[in-house]
């Protein structure tokens, strides 16, 4: 194992041991301090983050006047995002010791669509939650299990080093999640389709395409690639596709908005239906991200203008052949870069 991988593995090991043993008021300032250091370093991840944030700020500014971006405002916002991101890791490490009562009691959600979700599951209709990289996915996953979903299935790209991936896998399985690796096992799309036909819940973090089969959508005034998986699963299985956004409430609480179902269009072929639904998913993500921009942890490239031209050409070629049968959407660590210092 390379030195860098050993350091990462040791760091995550400490996260699941030492952080859980210390009082939360002691470790929270340490994580915030680490976020501030990463922010000041202005590393690659922070630069990419600020490039993504600029798109959102320009869209907001254009709605009210000139689309000039204040550099100080951008830097302040990116610092807030890094602190939010650090809180995600802190709470993920501590989730095994956070009481279930707190997870349920301090979650704020639109109850109507939660009730509709549980009704669908009770009646044997599968549900797909599609989420952007926002807030605390792990806490939200545990919460939805506790309030009646029972369990859900998600997909994760294999991390490096393998020891970290195994920790994440065991951790999530311990919370009641079924995690499907993108490689080294059955094709995730087929397994998720089976679960949905059985009336189960599938959750996919889907604001960045990890395959070469993404759908090109309009996203904050530019073109971006989003995974085809959520919409393709809904078209193929008849499951309800519902966009969800998550965020932090104060210092100890959480929030989530479960959006209305994105219906399968009546007309068009399969590829056209997937494209229409993915665009609607992107629009729903825009609303959620704009409302809680400081909790959008997107430190990777997703806009077409930022992507590698060779990869983009490959994606467009595959889509031209109608290949949208891909369920990859990733979980929090789905890009394989999440554990690395930004």
Image (tube, helix red, strand yellow):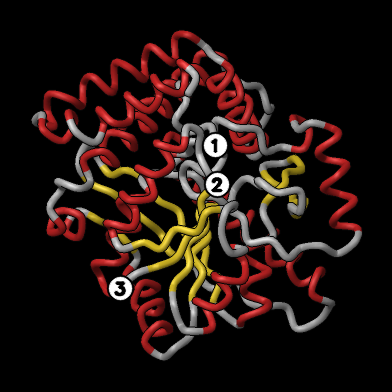
Which label belongs to residue 336?
Answer: 1
- Of label 1 and label 2, which has the lower sequence position? 2
Rendered location of residue 174, percent (x, y): 27, 56
Disc 3/disc 1 C-alpha distance (Å): 28 Å
Residue ID for mark 2: 157
What residue sits 33% from the left and 73% below the top? 149
Residue ID for mark 3: 150
Disc 1/disc 2 C-alpha distance (Å): 6 Å
- Quick check: can you spot residue 255? no
Disc 3 crowd, CA 10 A, few/some/many (<14, 14-19, 20+): some
SS for callout 2: loop
Disc 1 crowd, CA 10 A, few/some/many (<14, 14-19, 20+): some
What residue sits 44% from the left and 15% below the top? 39
Left or right: residue 76 compared with residue 33: right
SS for callout 3: loop
Q: Are marks 3 and 1 in contact (CB under 8 Å)?
A: no
| Image quadrant in which you'd find residue 240 | bottom right
Disc 2 crowd, CA 10 A, few/some/many (<14, 14-19, 20+): many
């Amino acid at each position: 194992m390379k030195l860098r991988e050993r350091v990462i593995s040791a760091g995550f090991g400490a996260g699941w041991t030492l952080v859980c043993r210390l009082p939360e008021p002691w470790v929270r300032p340490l994580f915030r301090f680490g976020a501030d250091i990463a922010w000041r370093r202005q590393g690659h991840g922070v630069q990419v983050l600020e490039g993504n944030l600029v798109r959102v700020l320009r869209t907001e500014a254009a709605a009210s006047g000139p689309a000039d971006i204040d550099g100080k405002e951008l830097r302040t916002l990116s610092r807030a995002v890094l602190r939010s991101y650090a809180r995600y890791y802190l709470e993920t490490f501590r989730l095994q010791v956070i009481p279930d009562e707190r997870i349920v009691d301090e979650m704020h959600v639109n109850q109507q669509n939660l009730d509709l979700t549980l009704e669908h599951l009770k009646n044997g209709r599968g549900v797909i939650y599609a989420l952007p990289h926002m807030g605390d996915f792990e806490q939200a996953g545990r919460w939805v299990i506790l309030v009646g979903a029972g369990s859900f299935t998600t997909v994760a790209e294999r991390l490096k080093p393998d020891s970290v991936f195994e920790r994440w896998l065991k951790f999530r399985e311990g919370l009641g999640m079924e995690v499907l690796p993108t490689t080294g096992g059955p094709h995730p799309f087929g397994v998720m389709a089976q679960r949905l036909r059985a009336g189960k819940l599938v959750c996919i973090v889907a604001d960045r395409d990890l395959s070469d089969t993404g759908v090109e959508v309009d996203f904050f005034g530019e073109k971006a690639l989003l995974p085809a998986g959520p919409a393709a699963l809904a078209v193929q299985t008849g499951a309800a596709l519902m966009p969800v956004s998550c965020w932090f409430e104060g210092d100890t609480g959480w929030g989530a908005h479960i959006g209305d179902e994105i219906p399968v269009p009546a007309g068009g072929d399969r590829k056209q239906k997937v494209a229409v639904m993915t665009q609607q998913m992107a629009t729903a993500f825009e609303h959620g991200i704009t409302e809680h921009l400081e909790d959008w942890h997107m430190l990777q490239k997703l806009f077409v203008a930022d992507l590698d031209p060779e990869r983009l050409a490959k994606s467009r070629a595959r889509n031209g052949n109608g290949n949208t049968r891909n369920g990859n959407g990733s979980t929090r660590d789905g890009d394989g870069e999440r554990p690395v210092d930004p």
